[in-house]
Each structure stands twice: as C-alpha cells, then as structure tokens.
Amino acid sequence: MSNTLSASEQIEELQRKIEQLKHQSLLELRVKLAEARGVVVALENELEKLTGKAPGATASGRKARTSITIEDVVKAIKGGATNYKSISAKLGCSAATVTNKIKAQGKVAGITSTGQKAAFKLAVK
C-alpha cells in the first residue's frame, strides 16, 4: 500500500474537510450572533434604566401587539368613531385588530353596521 492517495480519494477527503469547516464556521457564527444579541439586550436594559422607558420596538423591529377589548371598541364608537380606521386610531391599534374583535364579539356587544364602502358606519344599540 502506498501513502499517496488517488485523485478521487483526495477530492473526497477535501470535500469532507470543506463540510467540517462549513459546520465549524456555522457554529462560530451562531455563537457570535448569540453574543451580539446578549449585548443588544444589555444595552436596551441600560437605556431603560437611564430613561425609565422600555424600548419602543422589539428586537426584530416589529411593533408590539396591542390588545383591545370589545368594551374599548364600544367606548370608541360611543365617543364618535364610526369606522374601523377611526376606532383603531382612538385605540392605538391596527384596523385589522378592530375588525377581528368586532367580527368575533360585535353581535354580543350590540355593534351594528350600516352602509357600504364610503357610507359604512358602525353603531352600538
């Protein structure tokens, strides 16, 4: 047996090394990412201590979800909001959140709608 490898054996060995290096590189990047996230959390905590306010957006940059109750929607309608957009503006949430809440619990709360498109209005019985 000779110590020299054939060309195909050398290729296979190099491919195995490449796969090992890729795997090692991925692990290193994941560790660096975890460390960086830890630094971000520490900085956000420090900012919160200094300002007394929690950061506005989550780490992913998305706005935090706003939870509303059907009572909030009823109060907004009684306060003069007559469509999904104006209710959402009063409550500080999205129009989709208001729509879903009204679809789920609107009948029980006595919310009715009249008209379509531009003439659409919501009311409480």
Image (spheres, rainbow, N blue to C red):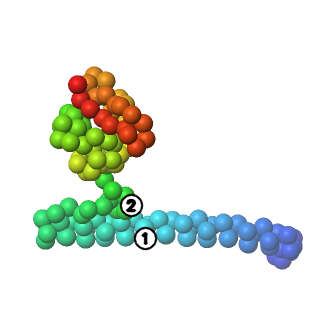
Q: Residues within 10 Å of mark 1 (few under 14, many from 20)?
A: few
Q: Quadrant of residue 59?
A: bottom left
Q: Which residue is mark 2?
A: 60
Q: Quadrant of residue 53?
A: bottom left
Of tags 1 and 2, which is closer to the observer? 2
Query: For the residue labelled by badge 1, is the local secondary structure a helix, a strand or a loop?
Result: helix
Q: Classify the position of the C terminus by image quarter.
A: top left
Asked if marks 1 and 2 touch (Cβ < 8 Å), the reply is no
Residue 97 seen anywhere in this rendered image of the structure: no
Tag of residue 71: none
Q: Position of residue 87 (x, y in %)?
A: 27, 44
Nearer-the-camera pick, 111 or 72:
111
Amino acid, disc 2: Ser
Q: Which residue is mark 1?
A: 32
Q: Position of residue 24 (x, y in %)?
A: 56, 68
Amino acid, disc 1: Lys
